[in-house]
Structures are given as C-alpha cells and as structure tokens.
C-alpha cells in the first residue's frame, strides 16, 4: 500500500474527521469561556476586592521590578515582566478559573450524552406459560386434593 493511499485512508476515517471538528469547536468554545470569565465573572469579583480582576496581579521577584513597583504601584504585569522576574499569580488564577468552568461544562455535556445513550431498563419478562405436561400434572394434583378432602 502506498504512503499516500494509506494516509488518505487514515485521514478520511470518521473518527479523524470527528476529532478535527471537535478540536475546532473546542477552540471556539474555549474563547467563549475566556470571554465569560473576563467579561462576566471577573467584574463582580473586582467589585468585591476593589480591583480590576486578577489578571494584572503579580509578585515582584527581581530587584529592578521591586524598585519600579515602588516608584509606580500601578505598573502593569506586561511592563513588570520586561524589567525582570515576576510571579504572575493573577494571570494563573484567571486561567485556572477558565479551566474549571470549561471542565464543568464538558462534564455536563458528557453526562448528558451518556444519559441519552443509556437504554431504558427493560420490564421483567413475564414467566413462560406452563407446558402441556405441567398443566396435566397440575390437574392431577388438583383432583387428588379434591378426593382427599
């Protein structure tokens, strides 16, 4: 089998196409979740903590950064990174929130799909009808009970 033919067979399988569609939709969905966190969830949190979200929060690690922050307490994370080492905990926290929301939504989707895939439980089958021999034996038993009583 030639390399091109083998690749064509692989690439046109249904699973590969499903995966490609899933990756594209997942990328778009990730952007939706990021926008939701940045534009809907973080603003109320900002009101509570009195800042504009966590994204620009950091801890200065290098001496040049510390001096720059002392001179300008509103120094942005981007500018601080240019000056030296920083621990960007706010950006990390925002990404963790994005992940948690995305993981929860995917969990709900998988749970829903599994519920749809499950077949309803079948009602217990009725016991089979007695065979002709069993019916005859039951009649004999009933006759013997009548004679003994």
Image (cartoon, rainbow, N blue to C red):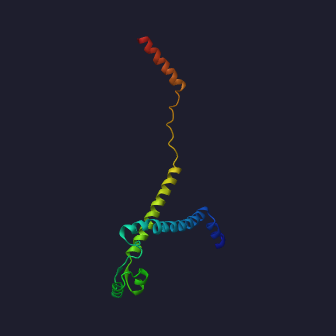
Q: Quadrant of the N terminus?
A: bottom right
Numbered disc total: 0
Residue 136 in percent (x, y) is at: 52, 20
Residues 148 and 58: in front is 58
- Which residue is located at x 57 percent, y 67 percent? 24
Residue in the picture at 55% in, 67% down: 28
Left or right: 72 in relation to 140: left
Q: What x and y, as percent, mark residue 130? A: 52, 27
Residue nearer the viewer, 117 or 39: 39
Query: Residue 3 sits in which quadrant?
Result: bottom right
Residue 73 x, y percent position in the rendering: 36, 82
Residue 56: image quadrant is: bottom left
Residue 22 vs residue 81: left or right? right
Camera-side residue: 42 or 126?
42
Question: Which residue does the image show at 43% across and 64% down from the upper left?
Answer: 100
Q: Residue 41 placed where, x, y %?
A: 44, 65
| Viewport quadrant of the C terminus | top left
Instruction: In the rendered view, tell whether residue 79 sits above or below residue 49.
Output: below
């Amino acid at each position: 089998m030639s390399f091109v033919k083998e690749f064509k067979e692989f690439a046109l399988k249904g699973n590969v196409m499903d995966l490609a569609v899933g990756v594209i939709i997942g990328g778009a969905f990730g952007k939706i979740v990021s926008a939701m966190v940045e534009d809907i969830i973080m603003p109320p949190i900002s009101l509570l903590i009195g800042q504009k979200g966590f994204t620009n929060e950091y801890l200065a690690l290098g001496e040049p950064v510390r001096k720059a922050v002392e001179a300008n307490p509103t120094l942005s994370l981007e500018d601080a990174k240019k000056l030296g080492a920083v621990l960007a905990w706010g950006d990390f926290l925002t990404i963790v929130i994005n992940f948690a929301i995305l993981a929860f939504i995917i969990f709900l989707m998988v749970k829903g799909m599994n519920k749809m895939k499950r077949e309803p439980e079948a009602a217990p089958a009725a016991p089979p009808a007695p065979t002709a021999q069993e019916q005859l034996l039951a009649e004999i038993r009933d006759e013997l009970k009548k004679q003994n009583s």
